[in-house]
Image: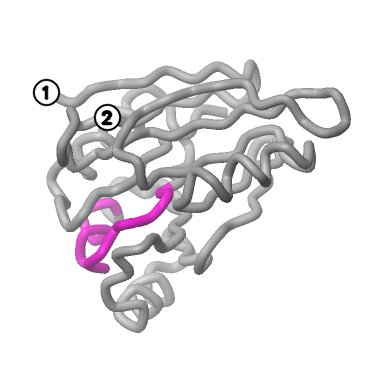
Amino acid sequence: MRVCIVSDSHDRAPLLAEAVSQAAREGAEAVVHCGDLIGAGTLRPLLALGIPVHVVHGNNLGDPVALHRLCAASNGLLAYHGADAVLELAGRRVFATHYPHYARGIACTGDHDVVCCGHSHRASVARQPTIGGGECWLVNPGTVAGLSAPPTWILADLAGLAFEIRTLG
């Protein structure tokens, strides 16, 4: 299963839609948004793509009531999880949050296969050692809005645990 991982869209709906559209063309079956969406309307263009979107909030929350209403009216395509999300996608345990320090701590537990975060606006993919001696993938897609960095997102292949940082433009 391929998944589009994005973060820090900061009300830039066209850039978010372009990243998700590119991912959909490459077979993405779900989207994980790691926060700083801000306006609920930023998600509206994604409804036409028909791909489930999982959203957590960040430090730029925007209007959570509007976000909840949009998700409730989306017929299950949009899911707002609050501060973090625990997901099972293609048999993989995926955790999403906004903050890298929190993500790193969660990754260390070994309870998840992949932990996604945002906030730093710097894309990265790393193997995080766990307390049990294993490893967890820690992925940060950077900022799809291109704020203080190029606009980036990640195409994840959960079957093979492969992650590609992509740049828009």
* Depth order, front residue of 40/10: 10
Give the residue at x 71% y 41%. 93
In this rendering, the answer to whether 138 lies above or below 47 is: above
Look at the image and say whether residue 108 sits in the magenta stretch. no
Q: Residues within 10 Å of mark 1 (few under 14, many from 20)?
A: few
Q: Is residue 68 left or right of residue 84?
A: left
Secondary structure beneath label 2? strand
As drawn, the residue found furthest toward the bottom would be: 65
**Quarter of the figure with residue 20:** top left
Look at the image and say whether residue 37 sits in the magenta stretch. yes
* Depth order, front residue of 34/99: 99
* Depth order, front residue of 112/59: 59
Secondary structure beneath label 1? loop
Name the residue that disc number 1 marks: 169
Name the residue that disc number 2 marks: 152
Residue 60 placement (x, y as % from top left): 29, 64
Between circles 2 and 1, the one closer to the viewer is: 2
Q: State which region is magenta.
A: 33-46
Q: Is residue 141 left or right of residue 144?
A: right
